[in-house]
Image (cartoon, rainbow, N blue to C red):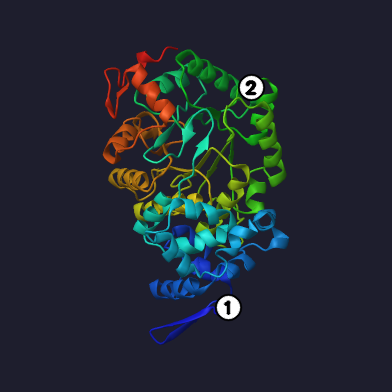
Amino acid sequence: MQLAATIRHTTYCFSSVKEVLAKANAPKSGDNLAQVAAQDAVERVAARAVLSQLTMQDLRENPVVPYEQDELTRMVEDSLDEQAFSAVKHLSVGQLREWLLDATTSGEMIRAVSPGLTPEMAAAVCKLMSNMDLMTAGRKCEVVVRANSTLGLPGRMSSRLQPNHPSDNVEGIIVSTREGLSYGCGDAVIGVNPATDTAESTAEILCVLDALMKKNGVPTQHCVLSHLLVQMRALDLGCPMDLMFQSLAGTQTGNTAFGISVALVDEAWAKMKEQGTTRGPNVMYFETGQGSELSSAAHHDADQVTLEARCYGFARRYEPFLVNTVVGFIGPEYLESGREITRAGLEDHFMGKLLGVPMGCDACFTYHADMSQDELESLKVLLGAAGCAFLMSMPVGDDIMLNYQSSSFHDIPSVRRLLASRPTPEFDAWLVEKGIMDGDAPGPRFGDPTVIVS
């Protein structure tokens, strides 16, 4: 295994595969903060030259956190599909990139090898791709899942309706939900970030959302994004719950900071299979974001793209219905500009789908990041063109509780029309029935929240 490359008569030597992965990464403020980034563009090119020659076998044998130290590493290694891995183990990272981008390589072919890929492999090939490469390959990687509706079909783009309220006022949540539904949003999930992380408040919000959905026949899912343990207690209170949520990190120490472990998520998954109310087989919802491990000093000197890929390796164990990268939410310490946030959104979408999970993206930024509204709107269109399963949707794109800028109720139908995309088939039919949409055009009741009876 060669870990050196000569560029312009200067030889660059790297001490480990982990260092190569980090220094091959596109520029990120988080990698600079962690002091793992390339010193300059030439060293980055040298690292990419080395990375392009490493094989899938090399990457499997060199995870960024050792097997003995990390339960996620052990989980990925112990559950890897050996038959799928045997089909790609001889490929270099450069060869895998060429295969993914080849016009003759189909989504079905990619799905066949996906169970044999480790997160480090997905991250490695990502680092050799341009933004358009990420979009081209990401669009090929179709992941279709089912809960109360069907997500991820070709030609479909969904949205999470996010009716947050700063005091968990259920009337305010319902008002926002009705408005979002009237614009054709919410087919991925109606998901509330709670202000009060208690089982009782989680159950109350789920009950009022469930009643609204049943009264209006809305074919979607509901979820309250409280901690996993809180949701498990809410289930024991007898409330309806279509999806169970949890934020994930890419290392064992990062997940300990979140208050979770593989064993706990296993327990929650089993509980949802037994007590959850969704009809389909996919019952979990996970959120991630580049930089979360560094924010809790749990990054093990690895770069944030590779650690993000490890989140998707964790998520795929549970065959989730939704995985969402909240791409600009953690702050400019990790992604400081529109260019970095755009790159991260396309990276995350590609890596997640390559590893077999249904990927959405909260294309967003905090107000102290160097990103404009125009750049944010461009990212939404790029993600839609790349086949992103869902985006966020909230009033005027401004979350009054979490205080960040994201996608508005108006953005979703605009991007759909621009890219000739439709909602999930079940939700699409419901929108036509309610007069909210007329095919792919606004219907007579578009934007009229009174069409949704509370």
One can see residue 94 in this view: yes
* Residue 408 vs residue 188, the one in the foreground: 188
Horizontal and vertical percent for residue 103?
Answer: 37, 59
Q: Amino acid at mark 2?
A: Glu
Name the amino acid, label 1. Answer: Met
Which numbered disc, 2 or 1, marks the residue closer to the eye? Answer: 1
Q: Residue furthest bottom?
A: 9
Kindly identify the residue that appears in the image at 65 percent across and 25 percent down. Answer: 199
Up/down of 185 relative to 328, above or below: above
Question: What is the x, y in percent for residue 175?
Answer: 42, 18
Instruction: Decide if residue 97 is on the left or right side of residue 447.
Output: right
Mark linked to residue 1: 1
Quarter holding the C terminus?
A: top left
Left/right of residue 56 with respect to residue 105 in the rendered view = right
Percent position of residue 288, x then y: 53, 46
Neighbourhood count class around disc 2 (C-alpha, 10 Å): few under 14, some 14–19, many 20 upward: some
**SS for tag 2?**
helix
SS type, badge 1: loop
Percent of width and height locating residue 170: 51, 18
**Which of the labelled discs sits on residue 248, or is there none?**
none
Q: Which residue is mark 2?
A: 200
Q: Quadrant of residue 427?
A: top left
- In the rendered image of this protein, does residue 235 appear above or below residue 338? above
Closer to the camera, 384 or 259?
A: 384
Instruction: Measure how far apart labels 2 and 1 are at the Cα level.
Output: 56 Å
Mark 2 vs 1, N-terminal side: 1
- Please give the name of the residue rendered at 64% of the width and 30% of the height, measured from the top-left corner: 231
Q: Quadrant of residue 183?
A: top left
Screen quadrant of the N terminus: bottom right
Q: For residue 186, say whether it is visible.
A: no
